Amino acid sequence: MAKDPDTAWYTKMETCLTPLPEVNDVSEVSGGKLSNWPERLTAVPPRISSGSLKGITADMFKENTELWKKRVAYYKSLDYQLAERGRYRNLLDMNAFLGGFAAALIDDPLWVMNTVPVEAEFNTLGVIYERGLIGTYQNWCEAMSTYPRTYDFIHGDSVFSLYQNRCKMEDILLEMDRILRPQGSVILRDDVDVLLKVKKFADAMEWDSRIADHEKGPHQREKIFFAVKKYWTAPPPEQKST
C-alpha cells in the first residue's frame, strides 16, 4: 500500500525522497499549475481539481469558500473587536480544513496559522499551501510548539467534538489559555451540548464568555461560543498576623 507523501506527524524519516507526480508532457507542471496571487486564494487547488485528494470536489471547495465568507461576516456582526481593523494581528485556526476562515479574512491586516488536526478525516494541509496560505499539523491532545501568548485570537470549528473520547476538554482549553494573550478572543463552533461544557471550564479560567445562535437561526444545534481572556492576577496571599 502506497504511503501518503503528506504524512508528517510522528513519521519516521526515510532515506528516499518522495518522487514528484508524473506528467504526460514536458510543458506540464508536476502536481498542477498554481494560479498567480491573488487569484490563487480562491482558485480550485490542483490537488482537488486533479482528484488526488479523495472525497473533496471542486464544487465542495467553492461552496466552502463562500460559506466562510458568510460565517466570518456573521462573526464580525457579533464580535466588534474582530470587525475592528488592526485589532488582531496573530490568529490561529484550530481546525482549518480547506483554509476558508483565513481566506475570508484576506483583506484584513492580519495573518492566520491554519492547523490541520492529525485526527481529521481529510489531510488538507497541502490544499492550504496551494491556496497561498500557511499552516501546520497539530494534535490538540498535546501542547502546541509555540510561545505563551502567541495569538490574539483563536478560532475552532468542531474541535471539541473531534477530540471527544480522545483527551480531556480542560487540557485543550488550558493549552488555548497558554497561547492566547490577555484580552485576546476565542470563537468556537460546535454542538450546543459540547459548548455548554466548554463554557463551564472557560468561566473557571476567568474567561468572559457567552454562547450565541448559529447564523441560520436559533433552531440549529450548532452554536457559537465567544470568549475574551481577561487580564487578571491571583490575589496576594493573606499575611499572617505576628
Image (cartoon, grey):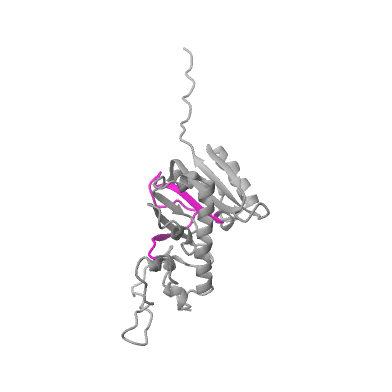
Number of dots carrying numbers: 0
Residue drawn 42% across and 68% down? 126
In the rendered image, the residue lying farthest to the left is: 26
Residue 122 in magenta stretch: no
Q: Is residue 7 visible?
A: no
Q: Residue furthest bottom?
A: 24
In this orientation, which residue lies closer to the viewer: 138 or 33? 33
In the picture provided, is 145 more to the left or to the right than 224? Answer: left
Residue 165 figure quarter? bottom right
Q: Is residue 241 visible?
A: yes
Is 96 in front, or is 66? 66
Up-down: is 146 above or below 5? above
- In front here: 22 or 209? 209
Q: Please name the residue shown 65% across and 50% down the image.
A: 193
- Quick one: 196 or 74, which is closer to the camera? 74
- Residue 31, picture quadrant: bottom left
**Residue 140 lies in magenta, yes or no?**
yes
Determine whether 33 is above or below 163 in the image: below
Residue shown at 34% from the left, 87% from the top: 25
The percent coordinates of residue 167 (x first, y second) are 55, 53
Residues rendered magenta in the picture: 131-159
Q: Position of residue 154 (x, y in %)?
A: 47, 50
Q: Is residue 210 above or below residue 8?
A: above
In the rendered image, residue 159, in percent from the top left (x then y), is placed at 54, 55
Q: Residue at x 64, y 53 (%)?
A: 217
Measuring from the top left, give residue 161's x and y in whole percent. 59, 56
